[in-house]
Image (cartoon, rainbow, N blue to C red):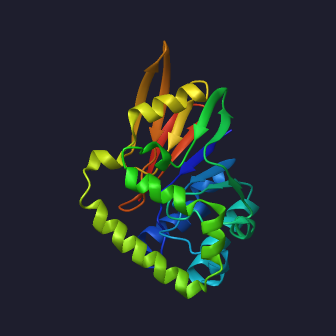
């Protein structure tokens, strides 16, 4: 069984070079995988499934659908930018939404999949904001607004977020090691795969006499990449 993992693509119509790499990935390498997991932030932002009529969003959904028709199972996890992805989007892609975190067994190894933002506990302002916007009440109220109004509000939030990030120390926006280790203990010392931090690497955590792997996926701002799980183990692959 070959399984691919991607995250933090931040797709949008204004990034044609990365978009092209993405579409070529779905037409090529992704069809060699039995399963593809998208672990959040597929889009730069997602205002709601009624935005599937947007020409760019429709092309992305169609590309996923064709990949699924070719035999690749697709699973989508919410990120901090696209937590409003819903069942209509997943259906258009012929895929399925999964929870965060999500447990799987890969070649006999218990593996926990996450987007990763909940591990950045030192960034208290972000965690407070995240808790607010993930409530059903906030989501339902927001989605009742006109689509154009939602997009305008998201753009304003993005500008504010980028301004605030420039004031934060980089370490503040990385995972908290204590939060990672507590999570690994709580889930029985699995291997962990996540994105969000844009700091691709393989980490080792030694806990209670056990060794746990943690793989951080790369973002797609400068190049495309995926993590491949096959008979050789886990291998990061760069796309150009």
Q: Residue at x 50, y 25 (%)?
A: 212
Q: Residue furthest top?
A: 209
Residue 237 appearing in the image: yes
- Residue 61 coordinates in the image, percent (x, y): 65, 71
- Residue 50 coordinates in the image, percent (x, y): 67, 80
Depth check: 234 or 181 in front? Answer: 181
- Residue 77 coordinates in the image, percent (x, y): 61, 54
Q: Residue at x 65, y 83 (%)?
A: 53
Q: Residue at x 73, y 65 (%)?
A: 87
Task: State how many labels appear.
Answer: 0
Q: Quadrant of the N terminus?
A: top right
Q: Quadrant of residue 24?
A: bottom right
Q: Residue at x 52, y 40 (%)?
A: 193
- Residue 237 coordinates in the image, percent (x, y): 46, 47
Residue 239 appearing in the image: no
State whether residue 132 is above or below residue 211: below
Depth check: 117 or 109 in front? Answer: 117
Left or right: 167 in relation to 72: left
State whether residue 137 is above or below residue 154: above
State whether residue 208 is above or below residue 193: above
Q: Quadrant of residue 97?
A: bottom right
Q: Quadrant of residue 133?
A: bottom right
Depth check: 54 or 222 in front? Answer: 54
Left or right: 167 in relation to 19: left
Q: Quadrant of the C terminus?
A: bottom left
């Amino acid at each position: 069984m070959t399984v691919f993992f991607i995250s933090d693509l931040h797709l949008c119509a204004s990034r044609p070079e990365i978009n092209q790499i993405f579409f070529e990935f779905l037409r090529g390498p992704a069809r060699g995988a039995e399963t593809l997991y998208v672990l959040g932030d597929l889009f730069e932002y997602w205002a709601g499934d009624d935005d599937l009529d947007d020409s760019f969003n429709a092309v992305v959904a169609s590309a996923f659908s064709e990949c699924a028709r070719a035999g690749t199972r697709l699973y989508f996890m919410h990120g901090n930018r696209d937590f409003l992805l819903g069942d209509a989007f997943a259906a258009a892609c012929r895929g399925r939404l999964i929870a965060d975190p999500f447990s799987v067994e890969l070649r006999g190894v218990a593996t926990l999949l996450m987007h990763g933002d909940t591990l950045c506990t030192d960034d208290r302002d972000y965690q407070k904001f995240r808790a607010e916007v993930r409530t059903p009440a906030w989501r339902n109220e927001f989605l009742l607004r006109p689509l154009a109004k939602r997009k305008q509000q998201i753009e304003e939030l993005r500008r504010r977020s980028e301004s605030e990030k420039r004031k934060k120390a980089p370490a503040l926006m990385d995972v908290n090691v204590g939060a990672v280790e507590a999570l690994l203990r709580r889930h029985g010392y699995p291997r962990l795969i996540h994105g969000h931090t844009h700091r691709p690497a393989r980490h080792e955590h030694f806990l209670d006499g056990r060794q746990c792997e943690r793989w951080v996926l790369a973002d797609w701002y400068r190049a495309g990449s995926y993590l491949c799980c096959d008979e050789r183990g886990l291998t990061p692959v760069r796309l150009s």
